[in-house]
Amino acid sequence: MAKLLPLLLLTALLAACSSSTGPAGATGSAAPAPAATNVLAGTPMAAYGHDLNKARNVQNVINQSAARQAARINAATGATSGN
């Protein structure tokens, strides 16, 4: 009986990791990025790769906004780039 309990627990854990998608909408409405931009496409981590791409896109928008703001500040104060 003592050897059966760990086997049952392992089976339950593996069943929890099955490939079923669960309830509708649980994975989000966005589709994974295409294989050209998602290095994890075709793997179980494809959704993570899509989220990573979204985060990179957000960071790019923030960087562009910061650059525009710095340019406006420099123009208003007559300062030059201090890099």
Image: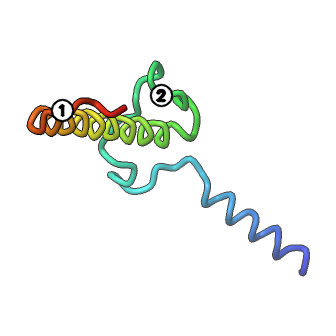
Determine whether 4 is above or below 64 in the image.
below
Q: Amino acid at mark 1?
A: Ala
The image position of residue 1, as x and y in percent, is 89, 80
Relative horizontal placement of residue 39, taking residue 24 as reference (left or right): right
Residue 38: assigned label? 2
Q: CA distance from mark 1 to mark 2?
A: 33 Å
Disc 2 crowd, CA 10 A, few/some/many (<14, 14-19, 20+): some
Tell me the quarter of the picture where residue 14 sits: bottom right
Relative horizontal placement of residue 74, taking residue 3 as reference (left or right): left
For the point 47% across and 28% down, the residue is 38
Tag 1's secondary structure?
helix
Question: Which of pointers 1 and 2 lies earlier in the amino acid sequence?
Answer: 2
The image position of residue 67, as x and y in percent, is 25, 34
Pick whichever, 27 or 82, lies toward us: 82
Tag 2's secondary structure?
loop
For the point 18% across and 39% down, the residue is 69
Residue 62: assigned label? none
Q: Amino acid at mark 2?
A: Asn
Disc 1 crowd, CA 10 A, few/some/many (<14, 14-19, 20+): some
Pick whichever, 78 or 41, lies toward us: 78
Residue 71: assigned label? 1
